[in-house]
Image (cartoon, rainbow, N blue to C red):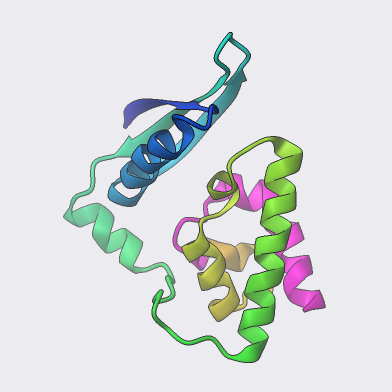
Amino acid sequence: MRLKLFKIRVSDEFIAVDQKSLDKFLAQHNVLKYESAFVKDHDPYWSVILYYEEMNLQVNEVKSQKYSADKDEDLNPDEIKILESLKLWRSEKARDQRLPVYFIATNNELLSIAKYKPLKTEELLDIKGFGKHKIENYGEEIIGILERV
């Protein structure tokens, strides 16, 4: 397991560049867990520590067993409602926890949930990007959204 530290500065001048750097790293690595903290300095920022594995054939084989919706795949009206509800929930959760929305769940993870429609929290393990941490923290709420929509 490797470690990478990011500093996400919250000033308008830097936040987009810093987030782009983090997004690029997330897209290219298998993140096992993360820690974050808000640092109240004269220039406040988010400190983000990512624990990850280098991408290799073995990791790709394991990841390919998990469900991941194709970003270009068309959604039916029910799936659109689910996706919109999940995005609204994610925004509220991120605001409450003072985290960037992608810490809660990425767009592709939400899209995969909308397409796959898990019925139980354990089935969220089948979604690429969902592990024990996300399921413990958000699983019940996500299943609740799927039941209501």
Residue segment shown in magenta: 126-149
- Image quarter where the N terminus lies is top left
Q: Is residue 14 above or below residue 129?
A: above
Residue at 39% x, 80% y is 72
Q: Is residue 63 above or below residue 148?
A: above
**Image location of residue 111, percent across then percent down:** 53, 71
Residue at 41% x, 67% y is 66
Left or right of 124? Residue 142 is right
Which residue sits furthest bottom? 76
Which residue sits furthest right? 148
Q: Is residue 40 above or below residue 98?
A: above
Which residue sits furthest top? 42
Viewer-proximal residue among 73 and 13: 13
- Image quarter where the C terminus lies is bottom right
**Image location of residue 68, percent across then percent down:** 42, 70
**Image location of residue 148, percent across then percent down:** 82, 76
Residue at 78% x, 76% y is 147
Residue 56 lies in the magenta stretch: no
The main secondary structure of the magenta stretch is: helix
**Image location of residue 35, percent across then percent down:** 53, 29
Count the marks: 0
